[in-house]
Image: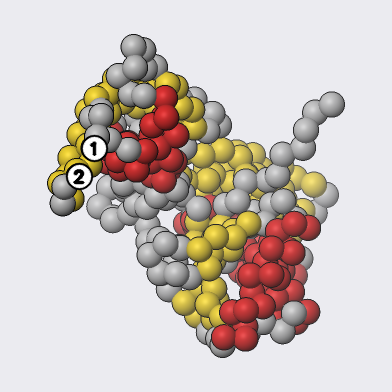
């Protein structure tokens, strides 16, 4: 039997409850919505403390926000939609990191050597314990894994999740008195952050397949508009008195498109938009995109 995987979460919105009562209701309501819909997720931004809701597209999240407000009477400030970018390294790197600190009569010591390698798209994260001969005692390995996991949710390039990564623990050192699971957690965390900085981190964005059906008198406008959104035209066909346009476009450029289309041709233009693949973001002169928690609207 083939398992059914939830659609990728491509859009994020930050929300802030307006009152303490709203705050108390929010967590339980979001948990209920997530249990009912595997494609809907939520988390807390570590820096801002804001709640981040995540879905497949703008309409998906708009529906959840409407349920929050109308059904459960949760009042909240709603952020502007942000694209859920990903970060990947582009080349293998080897890093050695030693965590050493003196705290009163006892210190902290842990040393790790890791190899970080990019994996094919869709591979997720893989950890390999390559320690032989007890260079890192087995009771400290969970600390190493915890330290690595703590980095994956926020990459070094723009703070987006790190994916398609293999990390091998190949060597290390410990101290009979000063080493601990926490010390190895800290060492692994710092080693991986250094590896991401050295590994040619690249930002990836979701590319969408957009299909628009428009009357002939609106077709030229549709094509020009898609071109202004950096879309790559795939196909244009005639269907009776309608024109079907197919294109691939970055999701960031398509945000708000569902509000634009109804104004074209008095409602005679329709479209569908589905995730197609991830591709590297071209950032010639622009800084990385803002984190999703930035920017609220009432």
Image coords of residue 242 (percent x, y): 77, 53
Q: Is residue 119 above or below residue 8?
A: above
Q: Which residue is mark 1?
A: 178
- Residue 38 in sight here: yes
Depicted 248 relative to depicted 213: above or below: above
Q: Secondary structure at mark 2?
A: strand
Q: Report the residue at 54% width, 73% height from top.
A: 15
Q: CA distance from mark 2 to mark 1?
A: 6 Å
Q: Is residue 257 above or below residue 71?
A: above
Quadrant showing the N terminus: top right
One can see residue 117 in this view: no
Locate residue 29: give its quadrant.
bottom right
Instruction: Name the residue located 50 percent from the left edge and 53 percent from the top edge.
Output: 84
> First in sequence: mark 2 or mark 1?
2
Q: Residue at x 20, y 45 (%)?
A: 106
Judge left or right: residue 140 versus residue 107: right
Q: Is residue 270 left or right of residue 179?
A: right
Give the crowd class for mark 1: few <14, some 14-19, many >=20 residues within 10 Å. Answer: some
Q: Position of residue 274 (x, y in %)?
A: 66, 47
Judge left or right: residue 219 versus residue 225.
right
Residue 245 in the image: above or below residue 120? below
Give the labeled residue for mark 2: 106
Question: Mark 2 near mark 1, Cβ–Cβ under 8 Å?
Answer: yes
In the image shown, does 282 or 292 lie closer to the viewer? 292
* Residue 143, position as x, y percentages in the image: 40, 37
């Amino acid at each position: 039997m083939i398992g059914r995987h939830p659609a990728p979460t491509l859009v994020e919105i930050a929300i802030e409850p307006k009152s303490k009562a709203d705050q108390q209701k929010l967590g339980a309501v979001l948990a209920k919505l997530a249990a009912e819909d595997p494609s809907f997720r939520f988390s807390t931004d570590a820096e801002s403390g804001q709640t981040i809701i995540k879905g497949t597209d703008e309409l998906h999240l708009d529906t959840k926000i409407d349920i929050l407000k109308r059904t459960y009477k949760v009042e909240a400030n709603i952020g502007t939609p942000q694209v859920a970018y990903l970060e990947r390294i582009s080349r293998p790197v080897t890093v050695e990191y030693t965590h050493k600190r003196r705290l009163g009569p006892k210190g902290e010591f842990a040393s790790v050597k890791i190899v970080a390698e990019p994996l094919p798209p869709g591979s997720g994260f893989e950890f390999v314990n390559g320690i032989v001969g007890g260079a890192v005692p087995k009771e400290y390995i969970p600390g190493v894994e915890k330290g690595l996991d703590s980095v994956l949710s926020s990459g070094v390039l723009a703070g987006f999740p790190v994916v398609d990564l293999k990390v091998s623990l190949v060597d290390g050192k410990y101290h009979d008195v000063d080493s601990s699971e926490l010390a190895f957690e800290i060492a692994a965390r710092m080693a991986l952050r250094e590896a991401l900085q050295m590994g040619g981190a690249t930002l990836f964005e979701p590319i969408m397949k957009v299909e628009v059906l428009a009357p002939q008198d609106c077709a030229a406008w549709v094509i020009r508009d898609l071109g202004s959104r950096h879309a790559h035209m795939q196909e244009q066909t005639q269907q009776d008195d309608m024109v079907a346009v197919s294109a691939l476009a970055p999701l960031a450029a398509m945000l708000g498109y569902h509000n634009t289309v109804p104004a074209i041709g008095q409602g005679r233009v329709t479209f569908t938009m589905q995730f197609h693949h991830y591709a590297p973001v071209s950032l010639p002169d622009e800084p990385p995109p803002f984190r999703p928690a930035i920017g609220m609207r009432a």
